[in-house]
Amino acid sequence: MDQRPVGAIRWERRSKPGGDDRWLARLEPRDARTFRRLVLPLVPRIERSIGPDSYAVRAAADGRLRPWPGAAVGCARELRSFLRALAEAGVRGLPVGPDPSAILANGVLAHADRLAAAAGCRPIRWVDDVVFAAAGPGGAIRAFDAWRRGLAELGLEAHDGKTRMFTDIGEALFAIGTSGGSDVRHGDHGIIPEP
């Protein structure tokens, strides 16, 4: 099945607390429905690929991805075709903003998560933002190196300008809570367990 051209994409600029901008892709309603329809059948397989060894973006309180109503069967060929149509409309990679992008990112990044977990550190990840909490710097460095190798195998790389290591949990929690995109307040440990 050939993919029809996607409709106009509305680009929405969101300022991040650090001063940079993030451009969100707002798809036309018909395209948003298509994206969801094509990704929904992949949710069980992606959930299995993530496994219990990592926390990742999951919409439900029990840690499972919340399925969308009106589930329909899609196929990988249609999804590739749809993503190609988005690329032709100016979207690089997965469009930032639509929920299905986070689910696809989970499926892609699960490979790197498994390598980090095998290196001894369970990743805590929100889409492509990842935290490695370890007893000491050596464990975090080994896990991050494994995660970076996993990304490289996929043709991806970590953003060096956004990569930091903390040895003080209070400083780390403050940075996570104030760096944008997080609802973790200073002093609120959120999903990060007590030391």
Image (spheres, rainbow, N blue to C red):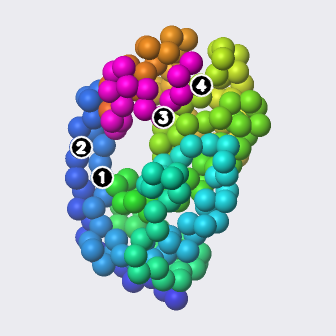
The image position of residue 18, as x and y in percent, is 29, 27
Between 134 and 35, the one lying in front of the other is 134
Instruction: Evaluate if marks 1 and 3 touch, with contact meaning CB atoms under 8 Å apart.
Output: no
Instruction: Quickly name the residue at label 4.
Output: 133
The amino acid on which the numbered mark 1 sits, given as a three-letter code, is Leu
**Could you say which disc has been placed on residue 191 in the image?**
3
Among the two numbered marks 2 and 1 on one chain, the one whose residue lies closer to the N terminus? 2
Query: Which marked residue is nearer to the observer: mark 4 or mark 1?
Result: 4
Question: The disc labelled 2 sits on which kind of residue?
Answer: Arg
**Badge 4: residue crowd in 10 Å (few <14, some 14–19, many ≥20):** many
- Residue 128 sits inside the magenta stretch: no
The residue where tag 2 is placed is 14
Query: Which one is closest to the eye, mark 3 or mark 2?
Result: 3
Distance from disc 3 to disc 4, alpha carbons, whole Å, reads 12 Å
Q: Which residue is mark 1?
A: 24
Res. 149 visible in picture: no
Residue 157: name its quadrant.
top right
Eye-nearest disc, 2 or 4: 4
**Among the 4 quarters of the image, the one containing residue 85:** bottom left
CB within 8 Å, label 2 to label 1: yes
Earlier-in-chain disc, 4 versus 1:
1
Furthest residue to the right?
Answer: 118
Disc number lying in front (1 or 3): 3
Span highlighted in magenta in the image: 181-195
Q: Are marks 3 and 4 in contact (CB under 8 Å)?
A: no
